[in-house]
């Protein structure tokens, strides 16, 4: 079973450097261009490669003899045990025939979909807001990442070696013994409570008492993510950032809430990832009873990474917890999970998820 994953940081983001890394990855995969079957080529790059990504994808079609060249530009990449984003970086995956959907005869093989999207608008599955599915393991087979840049700048994506014009694009691959783990990174401070008084963007009272006291609000904003207000409504939930905590016990919000809705505050603790890794460990050991998972793919929103907060160490902790697994990752503005067409968790920028699987 042949595949290869290579990542590299460059001084310059240009076509020649990208071509050299694709050639290196093809060589490492031991798949011969004219006699072996390359199932797909995945190109993931930091935004430095935005101007030449399409040309690199089209060149890769000929170099690999494979039309299924997919990928795009993201805020950051994880490979070789480190997070990269400040300097030009490129990650290339060359996958053999066993990764082709429908090709595998393995009973425990499942379809894993990796999805990149511009925004969460215009898609019914993303604009809906069901209640979160809680628990460390999630029955997901779709991992999605919003890839727009600062001030909603477009980050290019490629599909079948061509520029992708759709809102979202996806790559599918066979994954043996797939396990998807979800880290919300948030801790609820109370049970849901009813809103009894609001004024525009101000949450005044909850259950007829000052909002901050009733929701057990801390005296100041938490860092790095800040306080989030979960609003539970008839169709599910939505999340609103808390803009400020006022001396009179009211909360200034980024969006209004209505009387009668149920709300509760959530904060992120500094050791959230370490706590969740303890929950993940027995699940991983049981699922991969014969050994460590072979491949791990991280998807995370930028507020969960060193990209925005130098003291944050979430990605490094995940990598340390999986010493015998080839871990790679891509980071964008928000991450979500689906099970085929069912949205399990809406896009959030503090989410970190990991898919673990074997190649055969």
Image (tube, rainbow, N blue to C red):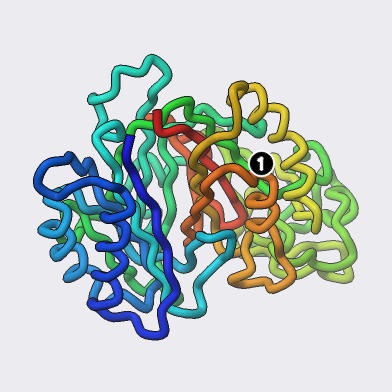
Per the image, the residue denoted by label 1 is: 261
Q: Quadrant of residue 316?
A: bottom right
- x, y percentage for residue 184? 65, 46
Q: Residue furthest bottom?
A: 11
Q: Residue at x 79, y 64 (%)?
A: 222
The N terminus - image quarter: top left
For the C terminus, the image quarter is: top left
Whether 38 is drawn above or below 116: the answer is above
Crowding at mark 1 (Cα within 10 Å: few <14, some 14-19, many 20+)? some
Q: Is residue 239 above or below residue 343?
A: below
Q: Compare residues 170 and 44 and report the one nearer the observer.
A: 44
Q: Determine if residue 118 is in view.
A: no
Residue 155 lies left or right of residue 83; in this view the side is left
**Location of residue 224 with respect to 100 vertically, above or below:** below
Which quadrant of the figure has residue 244? bottom right
Left or right position of 126 against 207: left
Is residue 166 among the parts visible in the rendering? yes
For the point 14% across and 50% down, the residue is 33
Task: Name which residue lies at 29% across and 31% down.
Answer: 98
Residue furthest top as drawn: 107
**Left or right: 231, with 96 as reference point:** right
Q: Nearer the viewer, residue 11 or 31?
A: 31
Q: Position of residue 258 (x, y in %)?
A: 63, 49
Q: Secondary structure at mark 1?
A: loop
Residue 10 position, x and y percent, is: 41, 79
- Residue at 56 percent of width and 45 percent of height: 353
Q: Position of residue 67 (x, y in %)?
A: 13, 49
Q: Nearer the viewer, residue 265 or 84?
A: 84
344 and 304: which is toward the camera: 304
């Amino acid at each position: 079973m042949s595949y290869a994953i290579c990542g590299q940081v460059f001084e310059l983001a240009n076509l020649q450097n990208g071509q050299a890394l694709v050639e290196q990855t093809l060589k490492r995969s031991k798949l011969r261009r004219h006699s072996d079957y390359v199932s797909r080529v995945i190109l993931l790059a930091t935004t430095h490669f935005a101007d030449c990504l399409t040309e690199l994808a089209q060149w890769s079609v000929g170099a690999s003899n494979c039309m299924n060249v997919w990928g795009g530009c993201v805020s950051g990449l994880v490979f070789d045990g480190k997070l990269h984003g400040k300097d030009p970086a490129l990650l290339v995956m060359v996958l053999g025939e066993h990764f082709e959907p429908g090709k595998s005869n393995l009973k425990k093989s499942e379809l894993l979909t990796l999805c990149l999207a511009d925004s969460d608008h215009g898609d019914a599955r993303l604009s809906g807001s069901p209640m979160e599915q809680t628990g460390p393991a999630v029955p997901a087979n779709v991992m999605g990442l919003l890839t727009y840049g600062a001030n909603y700048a477009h980050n290019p994506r490629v599909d079948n070696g061509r520029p992708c014009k759709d809102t979202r694009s996806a790559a599918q691959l066979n994954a043996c013994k797939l396990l998807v783990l979800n880290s919300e990174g948030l801790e609820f401070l109370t049970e849901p409570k009813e809103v009894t008084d609001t004024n525009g963007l101000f949450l005044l009272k909850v259950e007829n008492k000052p909002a901050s006291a009733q929701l057990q609000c801390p005296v100041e904003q938490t860092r790095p993510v800040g306080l989030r207000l979960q609003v539970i409504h008839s169709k599910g939930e939505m999340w609103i950032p808390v803009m400020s905590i006022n001396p009179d016990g009211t909360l200034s919000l980024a969006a209004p809430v209505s009387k009668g809705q149920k709300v509760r505050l959530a904060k992120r603790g500094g050791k959230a990832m370490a706590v969740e890794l303890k929950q993940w460990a027995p699940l991983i050991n049981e699922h991969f009873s014969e050994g460590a998972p072979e491949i791990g793919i991280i998807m995370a929103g930028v507020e969960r990474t060193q990209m925005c907060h130098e003291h944050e160490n979430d990605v490094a902790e995940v990598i340390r917890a999986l010493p015998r697994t080839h871990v790679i990752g891509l980071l964008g503005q928000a991450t979500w999970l689906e099970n085929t067409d069912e949205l399990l968790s809406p896009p959030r920028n503090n989410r970190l998820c990991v898919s673990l699987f074997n190649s055969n």
